[in-house]
Image: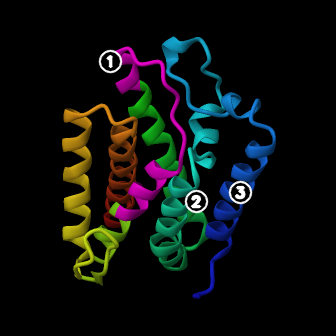
Amino acid sequence: MPHLPPVTKAFMLACVGLFCAFILLPGLEPLFMLWPLQSGRFLPWQPVSYAFLHGDMLHLFFNMLGLWMFGSELERVWGTKRYLQMLAASILSAAAVQLIFTLLIGAYTPTVGASGAMFGLLLSFGMLFPDRIIMPLFPPIPMKAKYFVAIFGALELLMGLTGRSGIAHFAHLGGMLGAYLLIRYWRSARRR
């Protein structure tokens, strides 16, 4: 297994540790979920804390797999500071988009998971290494990173518009938006 850089390792350990802790202390978990603004349960730290919680083992596994696959390399390329900025931008933009979406549709269901951050890292990976061949789990067909990102982004938009699956598809898209905007900012600042 490749070496895990420090921020990626810490994020993974925090997610796994909190998953285990809230199995033992389930009554505390709702304080850290991202509750819709109109629910009356929204608290100021939730736009960050929700990213460290997961609904079940499968949710946790796939987010940690994505963090390991994409986050490890991005942290090595960018370094700690930029990588932390990207995680923060993806997590916060995913939360903002999800809060706006739940406000518009009048939902009262909380959001949990690092999926918004994972989608931000996925988009970042596709922008930095567009022609890198990756082998996704679904479908198990080798493809360039840029196509993989485009397919997943389009699927998230389609599923977000058509269904009520209990998955925060617009949070995923929000994570991608935050990553895209931050990379554009970095690139424009470099040209000045």
Q: Choose the circle earlier in sequence order: 3 or 2.
A: 3
- Judge the density around disc 2: few (<14), some (14-19), many (≥20) Cα neighbours within 10 Å: some
Residue visible at 53% across and 14% down? 39
Upstream in sequence: badge 1 or badge 2: 2
| Three-letter code, disc 2 | Leu
Which mark's residue is nearer the viewer, 3 or 2? 3
Q: Which residue is mark 2?
A: 84
Residue ID at (58%, 59%): 84
Of the two numbered discs 1 and 2 in the rendering, the one whose residue sits closer to the viewer:
1
Comes first in the chain, label 1 or label 3: 3
Would you call the spot at circle 3 few (<14 residues within 10 Å), some (14-19), or many (20 or more)?
Answer: some
Task: Give the residue at mark 1.
Answer: 105
CA distance separating discs 3 and 2: 15 Å
The image shows residue 75, relative to residue 185, as above or below, that is below
**Which image quadrant is residue 167 in?**
top left
Rendering colour mode:
rainbow
Q: Is residue 62 left or right of residue 190?
A: right
Q: Amino acid at mark 1?
A: Ile
The image shows residue 69, relative to residue 115, as above or below, that is: below
Magenta segment includes 104: yes
Q: Which residue is mark 3?
A: 14
Q: Quadrant of residue 144?
A: bottom left
Image quarter of residue 55: top right
Q: Position of residue 32 (x, y in %)?
A: 67, 34
Helix or strand or loop: what does disc 3 sit on? helix
| Magenta: main secondary structure | helix
Label 3 amino acid? Ala
Which percent across, then down, holds residue 166?
40, 35
Magenta residues, start to end: 100-122
